[in-house]
Amino acid sequence: MKELKELLRQTEFSRDDLTRLISLEAQDDREALYRAAYAVKARTVGRVAYFRGLIEFSNICTKDCLYCGIRKSHRGVRRFESTKDEILRLAKWVWENRYGSVVLQSGERTDPKFVGFIEDVLRGMKELSCGELGITLCLGEQTEETYRRWFDAGAHRYLLRIEESNPALYARFHPQDGNHVWEVRDRCLTALKKIGYQAGTGVMIGLPGQTAENLADDILYYRRKGIDMIGMGPYIVASGTPMGDAVEASGGNTAEEKRRRFVLGLNMIAATRLALPTVNIAATTALQGLDPRGRELGLRAGANVLMPIVTEPRHRPDYQLYDDKPCVEDTSEECLACVTGRVRWAGDEPGFGSWGDSRHWYERRGRSPEPGREAGEGIAGTLRKPRRVIEIRCAAAPREELQTVGK
Ligand code: 5AD
Ligand code: FES
């Protein structure tokens, strides 16, 4: 077998190589993996963590994924829906506090009222920030027409986790009711790319029955699909869900098992960074659900995006995709101070006031962003060249000018 040192210097990785990296367990080996991935991140996208303020605005969901704490059939969940004004107030906070971008996330709905509501909210967010707020959507499977309407209203990134790139395994974690079809999800990602979004996907890591080979295949799927951004994190038990209860009952939720899923989560980030050097990778909240330093260790392992929660505090307890989700009792101000400290601890610079778009996306398009979509962008690939990021001056909120980071 190849020396690990030699493997970590490669730029092309086979399925076997990735499987080996993902399976590393010994502390020394893992540290070597994370160091190598961090070096690649520093060289390709920079030692900067970009923020996306996460607004979870409704937990009403038409889907019934067997693992998810807000699935339609979960009777114990108190359902909520924020108003447009509430969402815009949170978005304004994100903009004024210079996170640069928001992520709008909710349970999945496709009814015309919802589609129109989102369109309205998007226009409102662009208006209140004079086009400066970058917007990522995370609203599940929609028709191509809906994706296009939302794109035209100002969204430019879309995150749709494939959850599991192997259709047979996907079928095991989702009800077979015609409403959870792997091929539909896969086609949604194709549509998002075609429309012009930066397309993000990801998987859950450490699902029952999932092997290191499956995870290696997930990375190969990201590559094959030409994905620009990755949001993936460890699976965490959600009580009251079919999968969570089964895992618990079979003794699969021990401290040791949680540790295993956490390590797999870090190894996946690092292996993905090595295989896909220019994509954006999020250090997700779920990592911190399993380890208090989870997100900063994610940054050390090659991630470059953080999604601090800015959800209305009174709704946070009702948006629990899994048990013991972090930040539920915190305010957005506390999270702001907290994540900034975490980024610095990891040795990175906070990417305030920047969209932090995916370098992979720029390279895929072979050109710079379209006019009107570039305000606020701090393209990672040009970090060393100071550039003026804000063209539009906005009368709405007098405050210090946004700056490019990492000059
Ligand atoms: N553990 C970890 N992640 C989960 N998600 C849903 N339920 C869980 C869970 N129990 C993730 C899914 C979804 C994202 C919004 O949250 O991957 O795409
Ligand atoms: Fe919310 Fe740390 S990010 S408390």
Image (cartoon, helix red, strand yellow):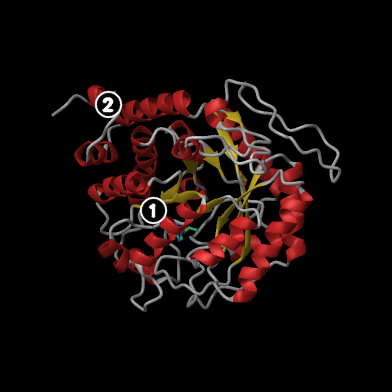
Of 306 and 191, which appears nearest the observer? 191
Horizontally, residue 183 falls left or right of residue 119, namely left
In the rendered image, is residue 383 in sight?
yes
Disc 2 is placed on an element classified as loop
Precedes in sequence: disc 1 or disc 2: 2
Give me the C-alpha separation between circle 1 and circle 2.
24 Å
Q: What residue sits 80% from the left and 32% below the top?
A: 400
The yes-or-no answer for disc 2 within 8 Å of ligand 1 is: no
Q: What residue sits 44% from the left and 73% below the top?
A: 64
Structural crowding at the residue carrying mark 1, measured as other residues with C-alpha within 10 Å and reported as few (<14), some (14–19) or many (≥20):
many
**From the image, which quarter does the N terminus lie in?**
top left
Which mark identifies residue 203? 1
Residue 211 lies, in percent from the top left, at 24, 51
Q: Based on the displayed image, in which of its 4 quarters is residue 8 positioned?
A: top left
Q: What residue sits 45% from the left and 65% below the top?
A: 68
| Residue ID for mark 2 | 10
Of 39 and 150, which appears nearest the observer? 150
Structural crowding at the residue carrying mark 2, measured as other residues with C-alpha within 10 Å and reported as few (<14), some (14–19) or many (≥20):
few
Asked if 390 appears above or below 87 in the picture, the reply is above
Q: What residue sits 29% from the left and 23% below the top?
A: 9
Residue 24 lies, in percent from the top left, at 27, 36
Kind of residue indicated by mark 2: Gln
**From the image, which quarter does the C terminus lie in?**
top right
Residue 142 lies, in percent from the top left, at 50, 67
Horizontally, residue 259 falls left or right of residue 19, namely right
